[in-house]
Amino acid sequence: MEPKWLDWAKRLQAISQNGLTYAKDHFDQERFRQVEDIAAEILADKAGVEPEAVLDLFSRQTDYATPKVDVRGVVFRDDTILLVKETSDHKWSVPGGWADIGESPSESVVREVWEESGFRVRAEKLLAVYDRSKHPHRPLVQYHIYKMFFLCEIIGGQPALSNETEEVAFFRENEIPELSITKILPEQIARMFEYYRRESLPVDFD
């Protein structure tokens, strides 16, 4: 779970962003900028950075504030799950990333699995939709994120690396390596194996 201060700051930032998107009155806009400044001060104080750096992050977010979508491809083969080793922290995750504009979530996950692992897959089933902030991931300041996990079937390709991945491998449930907690949690991996064993389980969601 995210710390309360981070939740409060993100909510204040969303209020200010939405207000600045729709407010026409000069005085209302000024009040929403003050709310944005307060959110930046909270984040800067807790994160140990300058408020200007946080405001720079905020300035890149415009229009109505909505969650971003992170798609993850869950691929099994002979009782093992496909993982990729991230170049960012040299730890492991199921392949995935941001959903792109112009793609459905299933199209995005197919692309992400291919780009990060070299395997061509077909998205078979939505397994879970998680609100990242309600799970013990490492906190992220910039975004509120929904994580969508899709069961995928390999239809072609072979292991290949990318600028985001430095290793591709399959692991049994009792052999899972150190995970990139920013992107995937051990309990989420365990839940995916439950889906592998029991295909009739309903979709998980927060």
Image (cartoon, rainbow, N blue to C red):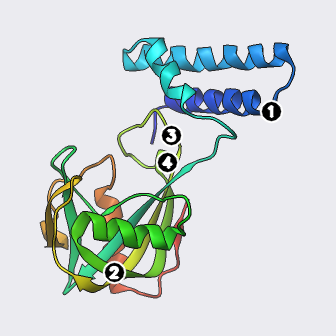
Q: Tell me which label, 2 or 1, sits earlier in the chain.
A: 1
Closer to us: mark 2 or mark 3?
Answer: 2
Query: Which marked residue is nearer to the observer: mark 4 or mark 2?
Result: 2
Q: Is residue 47 left or right of residue 104?
A: left
Q: CA distance from mark 4 to mark 3?
A: 13 Å
Left or right placement of residue 128 versus residue 21 in this view: left
- In the picture of the structure, the residue carrying the numbered disc 2 is 121
Task: Estimate the spatial distance between the alpha carbons at disc 2 and disc 1, rounded to whole Å.
Answer: 42 Å
Q: Residue at x 39, y 78 (%)?
A: 151
Which amino acid type is marked by label 4?
Lys
| Kind of element beneath mark 2 | strand
Q: Quadrant of the N terminus?
A: top left
Q: Quadrant of residue 190?
A: bottom left
Q: Position of residue 30 (x, y in %)?
A: 75, 13
Q: Which x, y percent locates residue 192? A: 35, 72
Left or right of 41? Residue 164 is left
Q: Residues within 10 Å of mark 2 (few under 14, many from 20)?
A: many
Which callout, 4 or 3, points to the residue nearer the camera? Answer: 3
Name the residue rendered at 52%, 79% in the picture. 202
Q: Which residue is mark 1?
A: 22
In the image, 183 versus 156, the foreground residue is 156
Q: Which residue position is annotated with label 3?
A: 143
User: Where residue 152 sits: x, y (%)?
Assistant: 37, 79
- Tell me the SS state at disc 3: loop
Q: Spatial distance from mark 4 to mark 2, Cα to Cα? A: 29 Å
